[in-house]
Amino acid sequence: MINRIRDIRKEKGLTLAELAEACDPPTTAQTIGRLETGMRNLSIKWMDRIATALDIDPEMLVRSEKAGHPQVIATLARTGAEALSDTKDAILATDLGSEGALVVLAVDYPHGEYRPGDQLWLRQLDPADSARAINRDVLVPKKGGRYAFGRLIDRQGDLLGVLPPGQGQKQDVIKSPAWLAVAEMLVRKL
């Protein structure tokens, strides 16, 4: 898991050994080093211990200070992707790196491999870069505050062809979208 333990530890002027000693119960500098580099999994228990030692909220260990919290902007309902009247925070608070804003599609109705309760994190792209998203799941804004969601199967000029998930669906053609967002991560509650 990408984390900010090292950055925050250095901002606070602590060594690996000092942070290890500040944990309750104390641990080793080697363990902290492995957690920082991702060589060891950063569990919720470890997040709580380290955050307490650093005197910060645990979510700060996995969220970038620069990045805004990704927002759920649409839901995948029975009839397809629908815009939300009010956005809300995504399940996770993390920065996946890379360029382009993150947006989130909440799944309310099962579609293909997506289950109710899932959140699909998508990275916004300029339509000129849509060739990178061919044969991947995308969310594309349509006129009237609506969205098209599905597999990007075709791109011709300023037209994008999106095939919704599920059987028997017809291709949705969107002309000159302001942006598109390609699926990067599926978040599923256990």
Image (cartoon, helix red, strand yellow):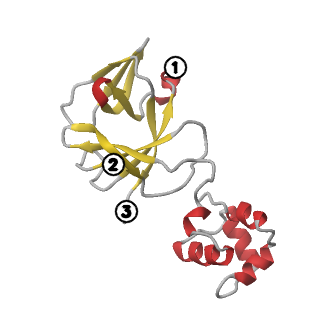
The residues bearing labels 3 and 2 have C-alpha atoms spaced at a distance of: 12 Å
Q: Residue 139: image x %, image y %?
A: 38, 34
**Does 158 appear above or below 147?**
above
- Residue 166 visible here: no
10 Å neighbourhood of mark 3: few (<14), some, or many (≥20)? Answer: few
Q: Mark 3 and mark 1 in contact (Cβ < 8 Å)? A: no
10 Å neighbourhood of mark 1: few (<14), some, or many (≥20)? Answer: few
Q: Quadrant of the C terminus?
A: bottom left
Q: Quadrant of residue 154?
A: top left
Q: Quadrant of residue 17?
A: bottom right
Q: Which mark is residue 128?
A: 1
Residue type, label 3 = Lys
The residues bearing labels 1 and 2 have C-alpha atoms spaced at a distance of: 26 Å
Q: Which mark is residue 106?
A: 2
**Does 39 appear above or below 104?**
below
The residues bearing labels 1 and 3 have C-alpha atoms spaced at a distance of: 34 Å
* Mark in the foreground, 3 or 2: 2
Q: Mark 2 and mark 1 in contact (Cβ < 8 Å)? A: no
**Does 115 appear above or below 84?**
below
Viewed as shown, does residue 80 lie left or right of 86?
left
The residue sitting at 58% across, 72% down in the picture is 47
Compare residues 103 and 87 and report the one nearer the observer.
87
Disc on the earlier residue, 1 or 3: 1
